[in-house]
Image: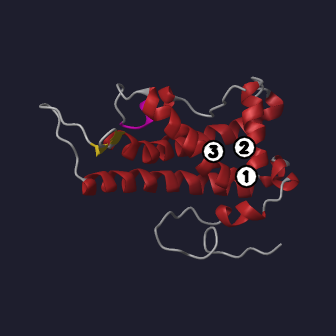
Amino acid sequence: MAEILLSSEKFIKETTNVSENLSGKYLLPSLREAQEIGLRGILGDCLLAKLKELVKESQINLAVNAAYKDLLDRCQYYLAYATIVEVVDRISYKVVNFGVAKSTDENLQVATQDEIAKQKYFYQAKADNYCLDLQNFLLNNRQAFPELKDCDCSRIKANLKSAASCGIFLGGARGRNIKG
């Protein structure tokens, strides 16, 4: 079965300040994780599956699917920045035969762990901002997406109220108990 990614390497490189030379070997697995973990937590299984189906069948641009096209467009920036959050460690360190290594070059200076953490925080804040926009769009347009009703959405309801990413346990998926 062919893998369906809702964004592209080209879009990510055009949107963010990632180097044109960054290999798809690093970028595509990061995009896959951003989509299958991060975006799935926002959209839920059924809505993500519907978007993938429409993209696979090349039906996303049909007039009857305008709401899904709008949703897909709104997912792009979240996916771009969430991908960069995932790729930072992947490109900063390599796991090799003798352990974890970082490469050096006479023309490049390797970033410190603190600098890498700051970059991840910067991109995570951007991803969180686009996540909140996406959540508000879903809440305001939930009637247009029957998949939000078909699935058991109790897992994602809390994720539609907060886009905060932090290392503090807030209780539950996002620190809220949503009833009904």
Real-space Cα separation, disc 1 to disc 2, in angstroms: 6 Å
What SS does tag 1 mark?
A: loop
User: Where does the image place residue 141, in percent across and percent down from the top left?
Assistant: 76, 52
Q: Does the magenta portion include 66?
A: no
CA gap, disc 2 and disc 3: 9 Å
* Residue 157, numbered circle: none
The quarter in which the N terminus is drawn is top right
Q: Which secondary structure lies at badge 2?
A: helix
Q: Is residue 173 left or right of residue 88?
A: right
Q: Amino acid at mark 1?
A: Gly
Tell me the quarter of the image containing the C terminus.
bottom right
Q: Tell me if residue 20 comes above or below residue 67 in the rendering.
A: above
| Quadrant of residue 55 within the rendered picture | top right
Q: Earlier in the sequence, mark 3 or mark 1?
A: 3
Q: Local crowd at mark 2 within 10 Å, few (<14), some, or many (≥20)? A: some
Q: Main secondary structure of the magenta part?
A: helix
Counting from the top left corner in percent of width and height, residue 54 is at 77, 31
User: Camera-side residue: 48 or 140?
Assistant: 48
Name the residue carrying label 2. 48
> What percent of the width, then of the height, locates residue 140?
73, 56
Residue density around tag 3, few if under 14, some if 14–19, many if 20 or more, within 10 Å: some
Which residue corresponds to the image point at 74% horizontal and 73% vertical from the top-left? 178
Q: Which residue is mark 3?
A: 36
The residue at the point 54 percent across, 29 percent down is: 8
Query: What segment is highlighted magenta in the picture?
Result: 12-17
Amino acid type, residue under disc 2 in the picture: Leu
Q: Residue furthest front?
A: 98
Residue at coordinates 73% horizontally, 37% vertically from top-left?
51
Task: State the SS at label 3.
Answer: helix
Label drawn at residue 44: 1
User: In the rendered view, would you say 3 is above or below 170?
Assistant: above
- Mark 1–mark 2 CB contact (< 8 Å): yes
